[in-house]
Amino acid sequence: MGEGAKVFCEHCGFESTILEGSGFLYPSLIKELKERAIHGEFGDKLKAVIEANPDGMINGENILYVCGKCGNWYSEPKLSYYIPTVKDAYFEDSHTTKRLYTHRHRCEKCNSVMHMHNTNEGEALELNCPECGSRLRVSEMDIDWD
Ligand SMILES: [Zn+2]
Ligand SMILES: [Zn+2]
């Protein structure tokens, strides 16, 4: 289950594909993310939470993050950490899992906290070109990348 969008800059030719959700490599992806998190790659706080709750799971779903200050954006794994509260719960869900850690995604350019773009609420995708700053042309796609 995944959604995506193709973005294209008519001004400078920049193009990119944004993927959201989880792809078919998800099980190995979250394993890898957890390994990296245990080694402290995503901060000491997450590392400590995992050490205290080794049976939890990391949320590796791709989310589009947008910086409200400078307009920078990227899609990357959510990186929250949670434990199932019912048997066999797999994906993070407020009814079947309990969140232990929320990752703050910071803008690489200006260090502001980035916010999640919420496609489900119909928020229009308005992104600027990272190369030249022009408004990007967006075509939403329904893609099955699993
Ligand atoms: Zn451009
Ligand atoms: Zn920024």
Image: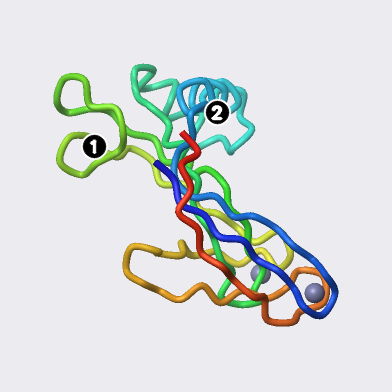
Question: Pointer 2: residues within 10 angstroms few (<14), some, or many (20+)?
Answer: some
Amino acid of disc 2: Leu
Q: CA distance from mark 2 to mark 1?
A: 19 Å
Vertical arrangement, residue 105 with respect to residue 145, above or below: below
How crowded pointer 1 is (Cα within 10 Å; few <14, some 14-19, many 20+) is rated as some
Q: Position of residue 141 (x, y in %)?
A: 50, 58
- Secondary structure beneath dot 2 equals helix
Q: Is residue 102 left or right of residue 88?
A: right
User: Which residue corresponds to the image point at 82% horizontal and 69% vertical from the top-left?
Assistant: 13
Quarter occupied by residue 86: top left
- Residue farthest to the right? 12
Label 1's element?
strand
Ligand 1 occupies quarter:
bottom right
Residue 131 lies, in percent from the top left, at 82, 70
Q: Quadrant of the N terminus?
A: top left
Q: Earlier in the sequence, mark 2 or mark 1?
A: 2
* Labelled disc at residue 48: none
Residue where numbered disc 2 is placed: 33
Q: Of circles 2 and 1, which is in front?
A: 2
40 w.r.t. 16: above or below: above
Q: Quadrant of residue 33?
A: top right
Q: Residue under label 1, please give it.
A: 98
Residue 60 left/right relative to 5: left
